[in-house]
Amino acid sequence: MVKVQETERNNGMRIRIKEFRARHDLTQADLARIVHVRRETIVFLEKGEYNPSLKSAAKIAYQFREPIENVFLFDEDDPLKKPRCNSEVF
């Protein structure tokens, strides 16, 4: 079994690419070739230093046969998950 480091965090998002790569026995270069990006892109994604385009994120999730939201997780304290307005205003 491959030991996987905790997922990286990027702007309120946890990225699980490294975990899924290990499950599917893929190198960074393998995944990059499959989804048509540079290996460095996979490196930056795994480090949480880059936000993927929707197209790239979808290709990566599809390769792992996972919904996109299982590979790219928003943290609970992320502002996108909070209501936009205060209910007391209405």
Image (cartoon, helix red, strand yellow):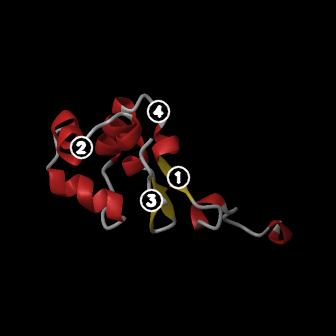
Residue wearing tag 2: 27
Identify residue type, mark 3: Gln
- Where is residue 17? Give x, y as percent: 38, 48
Residue wearing tag 4: 66
Measured in 3D between alpha carbons, the distance from the residue under mark 3 to the one under mark 2, in whole angstroms, is 15 Å
| Pointer 1 local density, CA inside 10 Å: few below 14, some 14–19, many at least 20 | some
- Where is residue 30? Give x, y as percent: 19, 38
Q: Quadrant of residue 86?
A: bottom right
Q: Earlier in the sequence, mark 3 or mark 4?
A: 3
Residue wearing tag 3: 5
Residue wearing tag 1: 73
Measured in 3D between alpha carbons, the distance from the residue under mark 3 to the one under mark 4, in whole angstroms, is 20 Å
Q: Earlier in the sequence, mark 3 or mark 2?
A: 3
Q: Earlier in the sequence, mark 1 or mark 4?
A: 4
Identify residue type, mark 2: Thr
Q: Residue at x 17, y 57 (%)?
A: 40
Q: Is residue 64 above or below residue 74?
A: above
